[in-house]
Image (cartoon, rainbow, N blue to C red):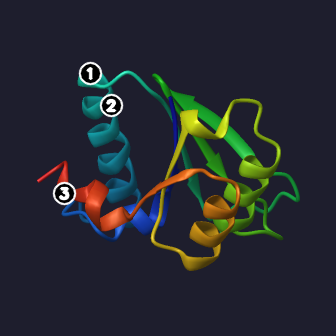
């Protein structure tokens, strides 16, 4: 199972440790690592890359989590929709975590399961 997460969308639904934006983002990633200790999944978390000055998205890996920052000319929403469009696995093996209407509509059109960010965040409370 692949879980694609709209990073900032989920981040704003959770009570995360940290004072700074970067600390809260890292806290989210740490929470997802704990989630993976009891759940077998591949997690891809996509953030808007406001600070990414490149015309290419940047990708990094922290443990089992793949982190994507969108290029400066696109949003995380664009990247997630592109991932759905170019998927290499069956739709039934993908879950998208978001509350963004544009992503939800596109995922539903492609028969991909949606979990609203607030619902997913409840798992961590």
Q: Nearer the viewer, mark 3 or mark 1?
A: 3
Q: Position of residue 111 (x, y in %)?
A: 63, 52
Query: Badge 3: how crowded within 10 Å, few (<14), some, or many (20+)?
Result: few
Q: Nearer the viewer, mark 3 or mark 2?
A: 3
- Name the residue rendered at 33%, 39% in the picture: 32
Q: Are marks 2 and 1 in contact (CB under 8 Å)?
A: yes
User: Can I make out residue 97 in this image?
Assistant: yes
What residue is shown with label 1?
37
Q: Nearer the viewer, mark 2 or mark 1?
A: 1
- Name the residue rendered at 66%, 67% in the picture: 77
Distance from the alpha carbon under mark 3 to that under mark 2: 16 Å
What residue is shown with label 3?
122
Q: Are marks 3 and 1 in contact (CB under 8 Å)?
A: no
- Name the residue rendered at 27%, 61% in the picture: 119
User: Could you say which is closer to the camera, residue 69 or residue 113?
Assistant: 113
For residue 58, side relative to residue 103 (left or right): right
What residue is shown with label 2?
33
Question: Element at badge 3?
Answer: helix
Seen as rendered, the residue at the extreme bottom is 101
Q: Are marks 3 and 2 in contact (CB under 8 Å)?
A: no
For residue 36, side relative to residue 71 (left or right): left
- Name the residue rendered at 18%, 63% in the picture: 15
User: Could you say which is closer to the camera, residue 19 or residue 82?
Assistant: 82
- Please say if 3 is above or below 84: above
Q: Position of residue 6 (x, y in %)?
A: 52, 59
């Amino acid at each position: 199972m692949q879980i694609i997460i709209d990073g900032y969308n989920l981040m704003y639904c959770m009570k995360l440790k940290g004072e700074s934006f970067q600390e809260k983002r890292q806290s989210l990633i740490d929470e997802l690592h704990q989630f993976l200790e009891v759940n077998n999944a591949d997690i891809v978390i996509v953030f808007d890359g406001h600070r990414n000055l490149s015309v290419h998205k940047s990708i990094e890996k922290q443990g089992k989590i793949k982190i994507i920052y969108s290029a400066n000319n696109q949003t995380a929403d664009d990247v997630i929709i592109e991932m759905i469009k170019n998927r290499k696995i069956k739709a039934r093996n993908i879950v998208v975590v978001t509350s963004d209407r544009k992503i939800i509509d596109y995922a539903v059109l492609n028969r991909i399961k949606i979990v609203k960010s607030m619902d997913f965040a409840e798992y961590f409370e």
